[in-house]
Amino acid sequence: MTGNPTFCPCPPPDCHSAHTEADCGEARNMTDAPAAAMDAPPRIPAALPAVPGPMPEPADAGAAESGAAESGAAESGEGPAPSRDAVLIRRTLDEIGPTAERVTSYFYALLFTRYPDLRAMFPAAMDTQRDRLLKALLTAAEHLDNTEVLTDYLRNLGRGHRKYGTRSEHYPAVGEALLGALERYAEQVWDPETEAAWVRTYTTISQIMIDAAAENEQHAPAWWQAEVVSHDLRTPDVAVITLRPDQPYPFLAGQYTTLETPWWPRIWRHYSFASAPRADGLLSLHVKAVPAGWVSNALVHRARPGDVLRLGPPAGSMTVDHSTDNGLLCLGGGTGIAPIKALVEDVAEHGDRRPVEVFYGARSGHDLYDIDTMMRLQQTFPWLAVRPVTEDEGRLPDAVRRYGPWAEYDAYLSGPLGMIRSGVDALKGVGIPTDRIRHDYLGELAPAS
């Protein structure tokens, strides 16, 4: 594989427009940061040990169609009153919200000016990179007091950042730049108490990530090399790709991977596995080429058997709970059917007989590219029902409402973000508790975002 791993506090998905470094690199990153600010000594506590990566990063259309974004569980329900630190941090974010673009540009300007060696570890085109930071912060603030969700995610994030070449000594530089940007743009609320709240928060969060990475390093590589062994173009813009990793790749049905191609070094994208773990060790992905999607178009239109890709560690919480006999209600839109298929296989391999209801949505019948596979599974397993839904027949969530009852089911959603949003609302409306609704879009669905 080519290219260096990248330390990415908010790793970008596929970029939606073709940029060059001259278009959107340092020239635009630096315009909001005056030279005086670059030269001024930081007013951040020197003891700050680290800064976290983002909470679940927003996915672009391609990542949404693949059914995966950074790990997350179902939306959190109402909890106790927020802690004082959470209140102070959210107050900061409320102030900087209207100046989001300037805040993120200033952050990277500080980082790259004070620590120029780190620039080479980031993607050349920074537009998407900048756009992700504020949403990540908003999500972190929204879930600051949800210890279980926050810790699980940050441990996954710490393990995942190993593939970028992240080391513990990189964190203070990022934390310094981030707090410097917040101090500048949250002038009305920034005071010693607020600064201390941010330092405490990032100290704790960072240590979770660092510890998880160190633990993971003892038994897993930072990334896997994976050879393309088959490439099946199902439609003009959807391919089913089978990979052979260079060493065993442990994952659970419903999880996803991050992937880098040799054609776009340092650009990582998320794709869900389209099968449960196989005895032969092969991995299957469904990829939809999206407009101007660098990685997705390369995988669909350029990748061929023999090409070698690089995979990050598995992540995601959209897995089957085999300790219960609840039915499974699965909504898969577009290539979001990939992890749903994996869940069906997982139930079958565990010998379960509980009902599994799959609603497979697409724009048209032509876009139901994997319907034959799903119908064969339905013929094989009497406990499985597959219902294709196209736009002519209405929206996927509306179709779910016509069936049921679903109160005794665990729900799984995978597909475009809009479908996830409406699907969550529909499922809650038919009586499924939020703690039994699983998807991997926690960051985008957080109320603060």
Image: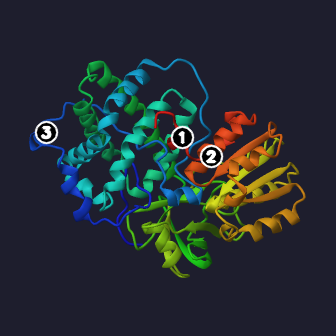
Identify which residue is drawn at 49% across, 66% down: 290
Kind of residue at disc 3: Ala
Q: CA distance from mark 2 to mark 3?
A: 42 Å
Kind of residue at disc 2: His
On the question of residue 273 being in view, the answer is no
Residue hosting label 1: 445
Measured as percent of width and height from the top left, residue 279 is found at 73, 67
Q: Which badge, 2 or 1, is on the more N-terminal residue?
A: 2
Residue hosting label 2: 439
Give the quarter of the figure containing the N terminus: bottom left
Tell me if label 2 and label 1 are in contact, CB under 8 Å.
yes
Nearest the camera: 148 or 94? 94
Element on which disc 3 rests = helix
**Could you tell whether 67 is left or right of 376 in the image?**
left
Residue hosting label 3: 37
In this rendering, is residue 86 above or below 432?
A: above
